[in-house]
Image (cartoon, rainbow, N blue to C red):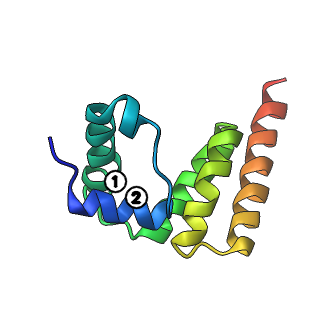
Amino acid sequence: MKLTDFAKEYHERMFPGYVSRFRKTDPEFIKRFDNFAFDEVVNSDDLDDRTRMIAILATLVGFQGIDEFKGMLRAALNFGVTPVEVKEIVYQGRRIWASGVSSRT
């Protein structure tokens, strides 16, 4: 299996200069993963990249995926999400999450 040009370009836009260790330890896996995540998924809907990143960040806040949020934050900024928008995503996600927790107690 060959890594598609689209997947390479999209990955580079999201994570400039980043090379996964899987390229050496499991090159077949990373080709399949990158083709899926950076080509098939992003081409399966009509969302623009900025909107997709906003949705991803909001989902990560909602699920308390802090480590993954940190990793996706730079990618979101690379796709045009502004720092003010990130702050609003965190504020709103935290507020909604906290209200859900307090309503269950």
Q: Earlier in the sequence, mark 1 or mark 2?
A: 2
Q: Amino acid at mark 1?
A: Phe
Vertical placement of 66 versus 90: above or below? above
Give coordinates of residue 12: x percent, y percent: 42, 63
- Where is the N terminus found, in terms of image quarters? top left
Q: Nearer the viewer, residue 45 or 30?
A: 30
Pointer 1 with pointer 2, Cβ within 8 A: yes
**Residue at figure coordinates x 39%, y 29% from the top left:** 25
Of tags 1 and 2, the one toward the viewer is: 2
Task: Using residue 35 as the reference point, say whether residue 16 is left or right of it.
Answer: right
Q: Nearer the viewer, residue 70 or 65?
A: 70
Give coordinates of residue 20: x percent, y percent: 46, 43
**Residue at figure coordinates x 66%, y 38% from the top left:** 65
At mark 1, the secondary structure is helix
**Residue at figure coordinates x 31%, y 59% from the top left:** 8
**Residue at figure coordinates x 64%, y 37% from the top left:** 63
Name the residue that disc number 2 marks: 11
The answer to which quarter of the image holds residue 43 is bottom left
- Where is the C terminus found, in terms of image quarters? top right
Give coordinates of residue 62: x percent, y percent: 66, 42
Vertical placement of 67 versus 87: above or below? above
On residue 38, the disc is 1
Q: Residues within 10 Å of mark 1 (few under 14, many from 20)?
A: some
Q: Nearer the viewer, residue 22 or 74?
A: 22
- Give how far apart the Cα atoms at labels 1 and 2 are: 6 Å
Give coordinates of residue 11: x percent, y percent: 40, 58
